């Protein structure tokens, strides 16, 4: 009888471990829709996929003026203002200077620039271990922040905004 209980305990433990291990590699995916702001016609989607400790961000946009535009994560998921000013400033939980993503000094929200083609379509992709989706770590968690597309490129110098111009699209990063 004791051998059966031990065997059942071993099997149950193995099943629990196997199930837990499988969950560690499952992707956490969040897809959001960008809405036009500041009388623009910009729209698009952004997808955040977290897997194995990394978040991959991909945004696809249309309705942009051809050329270079900045995209940032902002402090709040509130896109209610016509100019998206309700989303606050750049998300900067580590209190760093504004800069390029690859530089030591940058806001966690300083995603960077992308180029819209002659038809006004643009895409950008970033993979990082500096973000998480709903982990609760205030220095990494992107939930309840805002994603903003700007009218102009980020100059990576002007503090604290990068002189990226008006906000032409916004979405709350919410589930």
Image (cartoon, rainbow, N blue to C red):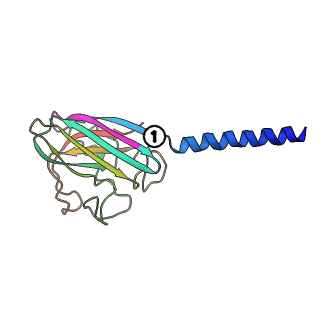
The local crowd at label 1, few if under 14, some if 14 to 19, many if 20 or more residues have their Cα within 10 Å, is some
Q: Circle 1 is placed at which residue position?
A: 28
- The reply, left or right, for residue 170 in relation to residue 11 is left
- Is 76 one of the magenta-colored residues? no
- The reply, left or right, for residue 14 in relation to residue 48 is right
x 25%, y 38%: residue:
60
Q: Quadrant of the C terminus?
A: top left
x 10%, y 41%: residue:
66
- Across and down, in percent, residue 68 comes to 14, 48
Q: Secondary structure at mark 1?
A: strand
In the rendered image, the vertical position of residue 32 relative to residue 88, given as above or below: above
The part of the chain drawn in magenta is 36-49
- Across and down, in percent, residue 118 comes to 8, 38
Which corner quadrant of the image does residue 124 belong to?
top left
x 14%, y 38%: residue:
64
| Nearer to the camera, 110 or 89 | 110
| Nearer to the camera, 120 or 7 | 7
Q: Quadrant of the N terminus?
A: top right
- Across and down, in percent, residue 15 comes to 67, 39
- Across and down, in percent, residue 163 comes to 16, 56
- Is 42 one of the magenta-colored residues? yes
């Amino acid at each position: 009888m004791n051998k059966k209980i031990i065997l059942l305990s071993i099997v149950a433990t193995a099943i629990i471990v196997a199930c837990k291990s499988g969950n560690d590699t499952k992707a956490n995916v969040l897809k959001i829709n960008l809405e036009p702001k500041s009388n623009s016609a910009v729209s698009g989607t952004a997808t955040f996929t977290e897997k194995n400790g990394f978040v991959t961000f991909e945004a696809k946009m249309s309705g942009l003026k051809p050329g270079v535009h900045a995209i940032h994560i902002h402090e709040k998921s509130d896109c209610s203002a016509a100019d998206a000013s309700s989303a606050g400033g750049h998300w900067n939980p580590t209190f760093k200077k504004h800069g390029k993503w690859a530089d030591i000094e940058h806001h966690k929200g300083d995603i960077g620039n992308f180029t819209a083609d002659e038809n006004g379509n643009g895409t950008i992709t970033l993979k990082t271990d500096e973000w998480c989706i709903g982990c609760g770590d205030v220095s990494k968690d992107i939930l309840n922040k805002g994603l903003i597309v700007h009218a102009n490129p980020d100059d990576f110098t002007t503090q604290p905004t990068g002189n990226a111009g008006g906000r032409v699209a916004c979405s709350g990063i919410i589930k």
